[in-house]
Image (spheres, rainbow, N blue to C red):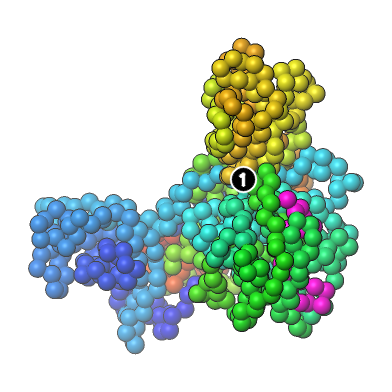
Amino acid sequence: MTQPDELAAAVDAPQRQPRAKVRVDWGRSGGFDHPLSDLSTVAEDLVIERQISGDLPDECTLIEGYTTATLAATLAGQRADDSRDIARMLTPYRPDSLLRDTDLVDAPLTCDLGLLTASGRELVRQFTGSTRTLTFSATGRSVELAALDPAETLRASVTLPPVAQEEAQHYNTTEWPFQWRINTQWVIDYVLRRNGIFASPPPRADCMFAMTCHGGLIADVGFNSDFGYGEKLDASVPAFIPGPYGMLAANGTAKLSANMNANAALEFYPGWPGRGHLFEFHCKAGASNTFAPNMNGDILTIGTGVQGISGATFTVAVTTAGRLVLKVHSNRTLVTTINGPAFTGEAAWHRVGLWVRYNMSGRTIETRWMVDGTITPLATVAVSLISEERSTGGTPVFACTPVPVSCMQISIAAAPPVDWGAPHTPQAEIDIGLNWMTGLPDIVNADSFGVLKQAAAAEFGVITYTENGRFRFLNRDTVHALAARPATATLTAAGALTELSLSTSLDSIRNEISLTATPRLASMKDVNVYEPATADELEAPMGTSRPIVTFQTRSNFRGNLLSVHTLSSYTNEDYKHLSACRPIRRDTGAEVTTGITVAAMPVSQDRVKLEIQNTNTFALRFALDDRRTPALRLVGNPVINGRPIAHVATHDASIARYGRRVLALPDNPFRQTLDSMQAITTSLLADLAQPTTVLRDIAVVGDPRRRLLDTLHIHDPDGLGGPIAAVVIGSRRTLSTTDGLADTLTLRVRR
C-alpha cells in the first residue's frame, strides 16, 4: 500500500472529497499534451478492476496466475474551455474535429485517483494502459470508454529456440555430474525482449551475438546455442547466481566453469574498412581471481570460422591478477595480447566494454575500453596480417565463465556508442523462477502473453502489470512473503467495512496432488531436417548459387560441407547420418562426383543458406536415377520429449482428517524436472491441505492506496467476528458522482 502524505487521514475522514485525473495521449507523443488529453472533469463514472486468475479450480482459490486490469469510464458533460460536449469533441468524423484522422484505439491512457487533503489533492496512480473501445451516444452526448493494461500489448509472435540438454548427459549423471538447466526467468525475459521490454541492457544496433545468461546459456541474438561442456567440482556451487539488475548470471568459480557456443546472427569480417566491433558484458571479478582447472580467463570470443575455441580472432579475457586483456589470433597463432584496465579490491560486479578495430591496410589494432562508465583513450598497436580465411558453418562465438558473467554481446560499431558507459534502467522486474527445465518446449509463432502465462503457471507464480504500467513476475516464495507481511489496514464494521460475507468450503481442500514432468532433451539420433520436395527444386547452374532453405524439422544444425556421393553410397544405410548430396548432369542424367561442392551455413533458427559451387561446364541437379527423386539431405539432431516422470505428493495429516481429496494438475510443457515439481507440490499442499476461506464481494470504503496482495485485518465484533487476516486477490474500484469512491474486494484468509 502506497502512503502519500496526508492521504491516510483523508481516507478515514468522515467527509471525503474524491478526485480523479484521467488522461489519454491521443497524439502519442508521450507527453499527454494533446488539447483533448485531459478528461478528468468529464469522467462521471470510473470502474477499475484487477483480478488474479489462474489454472486451479475456483474452490481452490490461490494467489497464483496472472492479472489483467481493465478500466471503464463514462464521459459526459462539457469541459470548461470546450465549445461542445465531450462526445462531439472526441468524435473523429466532424469536419472541425481535433481528432480527425486520429486512431482512437490503442492510445496510451493513465488514471489517478485520490482525495482532497488539507494540502490539496493527493493522487495515486491506479491504471496505466491503452484505449480499447470508445462507444459514442448521439442522444446522450456521452462516450463509454474502455481500456486494458499493457498485457494487451504483449502480442508479438514468439518462437523458442530448439535448445535442450543432451539425452546422454541427462540420463548419465555419473559421467555428467553438471546437469544443465534453464530457469523460468530466462523464458520470461526472452519473451519480454521480443516485445521491446528489457530488464537488462538491450542488444545494440547491428548486434551479432547476445547472451543474457539469465538462467540459461542460450543466445538471445544468434542461434544454434550449445550448452558446451561444464565442469562442476563441488555440488554445492550453483550454476547460476544473482547478478546485476536483479537477474541471474552464469557462475564461474574455482569449482565451476562452463563453455558455450553459438552462431552469430551477422557475418564477421574483422578487416572490413572502417568496421569496428564492440564487446560488452558484466563480470564479477577483483584484483585476485582463481579459475577452475580448465579455464584460461577467456570470456567472450569471436572468429572467422576456422580458428576454433583456442584461437579465434578476438578474445576478451580477464587474468588471475584482475587485468582485462584482448587476445588477437590469426588462425590458431597468437598475434598479440593487448592489456586493458585492471580491477582492484575484492570481487564485485563490473560493467565491461571493449571497442576494437583492425586496420588491414595499416596493420594496426585500435582499442578503447570501458569499465563501470570510465572510458580509456584510443590506443593503437601494430600487428602482423590477420588471416580472414573462412569456413562453412557461419561465424562461431564462444562464451566462457572463468568468473561469473552476464549480459554478453558483440556488435558491429564504426566507433564507440555515444551513450557508452551509461547505466541501464530495468524496464521490468523478473523474479528468479522456482522452476528449472532441461530444455525449451517446442513453441513456434505463439502469442507472447500466452507463453508468459504458461511459463508462470508451471510453477504457480504471478505475472502482472503494476498500476504504473511496469511488468512484474513474482515467484511463489515472493508471493508468500508479501502475503505474510503485517496488515496495512484494519477494516471494521464501524468504519470502512459496509458488508461482510464468508465462504468456507470442503471442496477447497486438496491433500493429494499428482502431475507429470516431461523433460525436453536433445536427441542424439540423426534425422533428415531438410530435403527438397522435387529433384528440380535445387539446381546447380555453372558458377556459384546461394539458395536459402527452411528446415522441415526443428533441430540443432551447426552447418557443414555436404558429402558428395555416388548413387550406391548416398542410399547406403551406413551414410544416412551424414548431410549429403548426389549430383547428376541436368541434361543427360550422368553421375558427377567432381567439380561440385555444397556447404550449408545456418542463417537463423530454422533456415540454412546453401552455397553451391559448380565449376563444371554444365548445369547439375541433385537426384537419383530417375531424375525425379531428390537426392540432397541435411541431417540434424531434433529436440524431443524424454521419458515422462509421474509425481504424486500427499499431506497425510489432512488425508486422515478430511479423507483423500485429489488435485490432478494439467500438463504443462514447462514442467520438466522432478526437483522443481517436488518443490511446487510441497508449496501447494501447504496452502490447500486445510479448508480455505474466501471473502467475496466485500464492500468497503474506497482507498486509492490499496493494491493487490495487500494484507488486511477484517474486524466485525458484533457480526462475524475477527480480526481476520486476509490478502487482497481481487479488486473493483469505482468512482461515481453519486456513490463517491468505493472498493469491492475479494480476499483470501491467511492462516
| 330 drawn magenta | no
Which residues fall within the magenta stretch? 306-327
| 311 drawn magenta | yes
Q: To which quarter of the image does residue 300 belong? A: bottom right
- Residue drawn at the location 65% of the way across and 51% of the way down: 395
**Residue 67 appears in the figure:** no
Q: Position of residue 662 (x, y in %)?
A: 67, 39
Q: To which quarter of the image does residue 27 belong? A: bottom left
Q: Position of residue 572 (x, y in %)?
A: 77, 19
**Total numbered labels placed on residues in the image:** 1
- Whether residue 18 sits left or right of residue 484 in the image: it is left
**Camera-side residue: 35 or 201?**
201
Q: Is residue 514 above or below residue 264?
A: above
Q: Is residue 281 above or below residue 130?
A: below
Q: Position of residue 552 (x, y in %)?
A: 59, 31
Quarter occupied by the C terminus: bottom right
Q: Residue pushed farthest front?
A: 617
Q: Residue pushed farthest bottom?
A: 119
- Whether residue 375 sits left or right of residue 195 in the image: it is right
- Residue drawn at the location 70% of the way across and 63% of the way down: 385
Secondary structure beneath dot 1 equals loop
**Amino acid identity at mark 1:** Pro
- Residue drawn at the location 51% of the way across and 74% of the way down: 419
**Camera-side residue: 304 or 151?**
304
Q: To which quarter of the image does residue 373 belong? A: bottom right
Q: Is residue 58 above or below residue 50?
A: above
Q: Position of residue 410 (x, y in %)?
A: 61, 62
- Specify few, some or many for label 1: CA neighbours under 10 Å numbering under 14, 14-19, or 20 or more: many
| Residue carrying label 1 | 161
**Camera-side residue: 114 or 621?**
621
**Residue 133 appears in the figure:** yes
- Residue drawn at the location 82% of the way across and 44% of the way down: 169
